[in-house]
Amino acid sequence: MSDRLAPEPLPRRDVLGLAGLWSAAIAIVGSLIGMSRLPKPSVLPESGRRFRIGRPEDFPEGTEEVLTEEKVLVRRTPQGVAAISLVCTHLGCIVSKDASGFGCPCHGSHFGRNGEVGGGPAPRGLRWLEVTQGVDGRLVVDADREVQPGTWCEV
């Protein structure tokens, strides 16, 4: 009896052709899935960054306090209270306070006592952030709102 009912074996050329077609189909589907994700941001923006830093009495006149968690320096003078961001305007490193102002440990930018650029690759000075006094009397820093350098919240 002959093997009339047995399927014919696929030639090697056809197997390689089918493998190529399946590989191309998988690559196209993978690309389409990747492109469908492009309109959606992979990192969602943070909601407003407002945080309370304490009461005005917590900051005696003539003092400066670094709030490491919020990455700001709070300064109290006779004019009022101000907050200076400690995020370098070059690439976002955290600057450290030194004797003459602030220094960026990553790329060597240097900022003066009030955050003005003193040298290095930073394109602009440190940001001064808006400070307000809430209805409960506590000071609130809005990290999303920049104010002109030298702007003080009178308390």
Image (tube, rainbow, N blue to C red):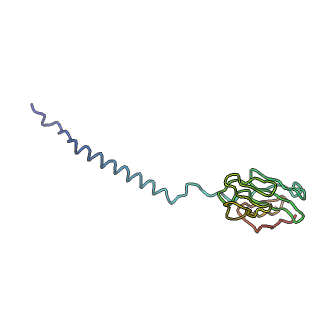
**Quadrant occupied by the C terminus:** bottom right
Q: Nearer the viewer, residue 22 or 134?
A: 22
Q: Is residue 137 left or right of residue 128?
A: right
Disc count in the image? 0
Q: Nearer the viewer, residue 16 or 4?
A: 16
Seen at 73% across and 65% down, the residue is 146
* Residue furthest out toward the top: 1
Seen at 12% across and 37% down, the residue is 4
> Residue 38: percent from the left, percent from the top?
49, 58
Q: Nearer the viewer, residue 120 or 67?
A: 120
Q: Nearer the viewer, residue 141 or 147?
A: 147
Q: Is residue 4 left or right of residue 131?
A: left
**Quadrant occupied by the N terminus:** top left
Seen at 87% across and 56% down, the residue is 63
User: Hey, which quadrant is residue 124 in on the image?
Assistant: bottom right
> Residue 135: percent from the left, percent from the top?
83, 62
Q: Is residue 28 left or right of residue 135?
A: left
Seen at 87% across and 58% down, the residue is 56
> Residue 144: percent from the left, percent from the top?
70, 62
User: Hey, which quadrant is residue 107 in on the image?
Assistant: bottom right
> Residue 81: percent from the left, percent from the top?
84, 62
* Residue furthest out toward the left: 1
